[in-house]
Every structure is written in C-alpha cells, then in structure tokens.
Amino acid sequence: MNFLPININIEGKRILIIGGGRVGLHKATILHRFTDEATVVSPHFAEGFDKLPFSLVAKEYEPSDLDGAFIVYVCTENASLNQRIKRDAEQRRILASVCDNPSLCDFTSPAICKDGDLTIAVSSNATNVHLSMRIRDAIKENIQYIKEKATEFVSIYRK
C-alpha cells in the first residue's frame, strides 16, 4: 500500500460512519476532535455514542446511505457487509476506510496527537498500528517539552 499523508478539509463535508460498535465508537471519538458533524448508521449503538454530537441513524445499512458522503468509515462487525459497503462507495467515488481490512482502505487514519492547532500524525501505513500508537503516546507525554524546544529553535533560526 502506498498512502499519501495529507490533511484534508472536512468543513461542510458529509462524513459517514457505518457501524455502531466499539470500532465505530473509537473512530467517532477521534473524529469528534475535528468536527461536530458526522452521521453514524447502525441498527445498534455502543454506549458512548449518545455523548457525541453526531446524527445517529438506527437502521441497517442501505446503499443510499452513502448518497452525498465525502468519506465513509466502514466499521461493522460483518466482513462481507464491509466489502459490500466498500464496493458501493467505490461505485460512487467515495473514499472509504474499512477499519478491519487495510487492504480495502482508500485511506487510513493515523495515530493522532492534537494540542490546540498543532496536530501530529504518526502512521505505519496500516502495517503496525500498535507501533504508531506507542510513538504517538510518547509524543503526547512530551508535547509541551517538544513545543518549547521547537519554539526555541525557531527563534534562534530566525535571528
């Protein structure tokens, strides 16, 4: 897989999460750091979704759920349904991330450390998620020190 690391503007875009289980909740929780607008489609929702500002649609997936979506996170616990959703998204030219199958992903979400306007993303291109998370956690633990040193470096460099 050859992923391009980019930041993408999601303002005013329809973001869809299909699947209301633990994985869907994890994606939704991360997404909430960047937007208050997303739609989650699932017949059932894990505890915690009610604390998010997202639109929860309690129903089984239908291809029309993808209409108008910019990106979709596919997070059901059914591998064949995930593959079908991916095909449906592909036909509509919608980027999809199939959370349990990196080989089907058009994009992946890196491990993220967010501090105000500073966002640091760590990715292994979906080959070693736990390593990415450990590196992200090390950055989180040291973010204030890192920011101070970076500020010192910039002030010296500008002189």
Image (spheres, rainbow, N blue to C red):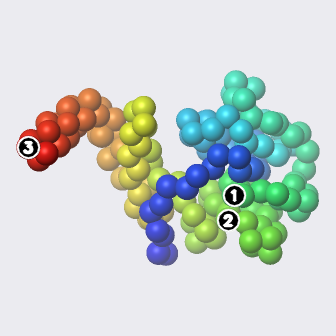
Give the x, y percent position of residue 76: 74, 52
User: Closer to the camera, 79 or 86?
Assistant: 86
Q: Secondary structure at mark 3?
A: loop
Q: What residue do we see at 91% from left, 59% from top? A: 64
Mark with earlier residue (2, 1): 1
Relative placement, left or right, of 33 versus 44 is left
Tell me which amino acid carries mark 2. Answer: Leu
Image marks 2 and 1: residues in contact by CB distance under 8 Å = yes
Distance from Cα at disc 2 to Cα at disc 1: 5 Å
- The correct choice, above or below, for 144 with respect to 27 in the image is above
Tell me which amino acid carries mark 3. Answer: Lys
Residue 40, by quadrant, is top right
Give the x, y percent position of residue 61: 87, 54
Q: Secondary structure at mark 2?
A: strand
Relative placement, left or right, of 83 versus 135 is right
Mark with earlier residue (3, 1): 1
Q: What residue do we see at 55% from left, 55% from top? A: 8
Mark with earlier residue (2, 3): 2
Relative placement, left or right, of 140 versus 9 is left
Question: What's the mark number on residue 95?
Answer: 2
Q: Are there few (<14), some (14-19), or many (20+) residues within 10 Å of tag 1?
A: many
- The correct choice, above or below, for 132 with respect to 114 in the image is below
Give the x, y percent position of residue 78: 76, 58
Question: What's the mark number on residue 71?
Answer: 1
Tell me which amino acid carries mark 1. Answer: Ile
User: Closer to the camera, 141 or 67?
Assistant: 67
Distance from Cα at disc 3 to Cα at disc 1: 44 Å
Q: Are there few (<14), some (14-19), or many (20+) residues within 10 Å of tag 3?
A: few
The residue labelled by disc 3 is: 159
Q: What residue do we see at 32% from left, 47% from top? A: 135
Image marks 2 and 3: residues in contact by CB distance under 8 Å = no
